[in-house]
Amino acid sequence: SRPFDLNRTGMVLGEGAGAIMLEELEQARARGAAIYGEIVAAGSSAVADRNLSGRREQALTNCMRAALAEARYDAGQIGHIQAHGLSTRESDRDEARAIRQVFGGHADRLPVTAAKSYFGNLGAGSGMVELIASLLAMHRGRLFPILNYQTPDPHCPVAAVLDGNQTPGTSFINLSVTPQGQASSLLVGAI
């Protein structure tokens, strides 16, 4: 799996799952829970053309804009993107274009990582495991690089994380998308 790399050859199947506990912030604080982040906003969108072919780029654009609007965040307040990073030609291209549409010139500096490069596509479990990976990165103050990323693809203009020395910032967007054009984004902030 080599998300966004010029020489990617497709998705790699993986196996895994994850779970997190969601609760009201004040309740978690009152019981002394370890708090890794707060879901600040969410966005979702489903877009298909008249032949019912998924339009991932538009769906991803819509859901990121919705999350940013709900949170009242601007582009500069996002510390990194946890990309869907499927490692297919079309999906990665669509995702990179959506990031560029939403973040404009800031996309040149916005770190993008893809946990699927470590474990492949976990299907429905991917989004949760990727969320956990970014929460832990934010908690530890260090982003993880995209494995196997060596050659930038000019059709995927993202600021790919290349080493473990980048800061994750204090917020991130976690992206998920299906081939049918259903997309979701979670905007998560540090506590």
Image (tube, rainbow, N blue to C red):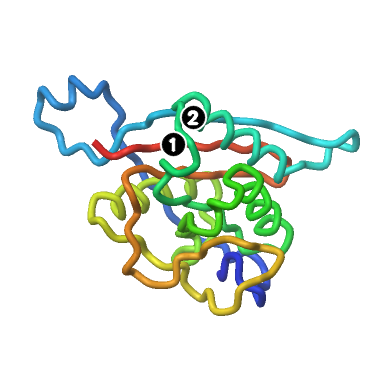
Q: Earlier in the sequence, mark 2 or mark 1?
A: 2
Q: Looking at the picture, how far across and down is residue 187, in whole percent?
A: 44, 36
Residue 156 is left or right of residue 149, and the answer is right
The kind of residue tagged 2 is: Ala
The kind of residue tagged 1 is: Leu
Q: Residue at x 64, y 55 (%)?
A: 96
Q: Looking at the picture, how far across and down is residue 157, in whole percent?
A: 63, 62
Q: Which residue is mark 2?
A: 42
Q: Can you tell which quarter of the image residue 77 is in? A: top left
Q: Looking at the picture, how far across and down is residue 167, in whole percent?
A: 32, 58
Residue 93 is left or right of residue 166, and the answer is right
Q: Which residue is mark 1?
A: 187
Element class at badge 1: strand
Up the image or down, 180 lies above or below 82; here it is: above
Where, quadrant-wise, is the N terminus in this rendering? bottom right
Give neighbour class at mark 2: few <14, some 14-19, many 20+ (Cα, 10 Å). Answer: many
Foreground residue among 31 and 112: 112
Separation of disc 2 and disc 1 at Cα? 6 Å
Give neighbour class at mark 1: few <14, some 14-19, many 20+ (Cα, 10 Å). Answer: many
- Mark 2 in CB contact with mark 1 (< 8 angstroms): yes
Q: Residue at x 45, y 66 (%)?
A: 161
Q: Residue at x 23, y 24 (%)?
A: 25
Element class at badge 2: strand
Q: Residue at x 27, y 24 (%)?
A: 23
